[in-house]
Image: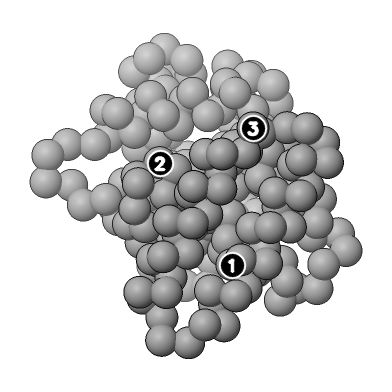
Amino acid sequence: MYKEFDYVVSKVSELLLAKYSTKQIFTAFQSDSATLRNALAKKQIVYSVKTATEWLYEGRKYWSHTSYLSNRRTVFWIDEYVKNQAITTWTFKFENKTRFQRLPDWAKTLVEEYLVQFTHPGLKPKSIEEEKRIITNFLTFIASQIDSIEALTYRLLVKYFRQDSHKTLTTKQVYNVATRRFLCYLENKQLLSEGIHQLFKWNENS
């Protein structure tokens, strides 16, 4: 039942030993992955990013913050290897991935379909991930208020716009521009009223 999981853990372990001179990170990964495996086995469920994410957020209630970060990193590395048969990045912010996984299916579908049309030859993976992060941020808030994108209202957009604060004006503008792009996409698909994206042109310098 866990043959594939064990194989992935062994391959990630090999990569960790090759990458890091100290065994501290390797030892933490071994311990965390064993804890995850035991938790899955106890419930008789197989590994997936969804089940691992649920384990993370359940464990967060009683782990120390340090333990949570270590377990989160372990899950990210396992998921990376499952998807890519390699660790393509060691510094990806796993929280953003789990936020996407926690979106309802209708919201995840919108993100995935949008990224297909957003992506083009020459666009760096980092830019795609940033776009995904911003749209996920937007839909996380929206999905907490409504059950479908068709129910989105101008009033709710204003509410999101006002609560979406950032450390710098530049970052706020980047989020506004990406969110406006996404809303235009939804308008073109006739899922939203034409022109609703104009809100994100309002008072961008404040």
Residue 178 visible at all: no
C-alpha distance separating marks 3 and 1:
21 Å
Residue 112, quarter of picture: top left
Q: Residue furthest right?
A: 62
Q: Residue 101 in the image: x percent, y percent?
A: 59, 38
> Is residue 5 shown left or right of residue 44?
left
C-alpha distance separating marks 1 and 2:
18 Å
> Of the numbered discs in the image, which one, if any, rests on residue 83?
2
- Please name whichever residue, 57 or 75, is drawn nearer the observer in this view of the structure: 75
Q: Nearer the viewer, mark 2 or mark 3?
A: 3
Judged from the image, the secondary structure of the residue bearing numbered disc 1 is: helix
Query: Mark 2 packing: few (<14 Cα in 10 Å), some, or many (20+)?
Result: few
Vertical side of 43 occupied by 104: above or below: above
Which residue is painted at 53% across and 29% down in the image? 108
Q: Residue 47 in the image: x percent, y percent?
A: 62, 38
Residue 115 visible at all: yes
Q: Residue 12 in the image: x percent, y percent?
A: 45, 59
Q: Nearer the viewer, mark 3 or mark 1?
A: 3
| Residue position marked by numbered label 1 in the rendering | 29
Query: Mark 1 packing: few (<14 Cα in 10 Å), some, or many (20+)?
Result: many
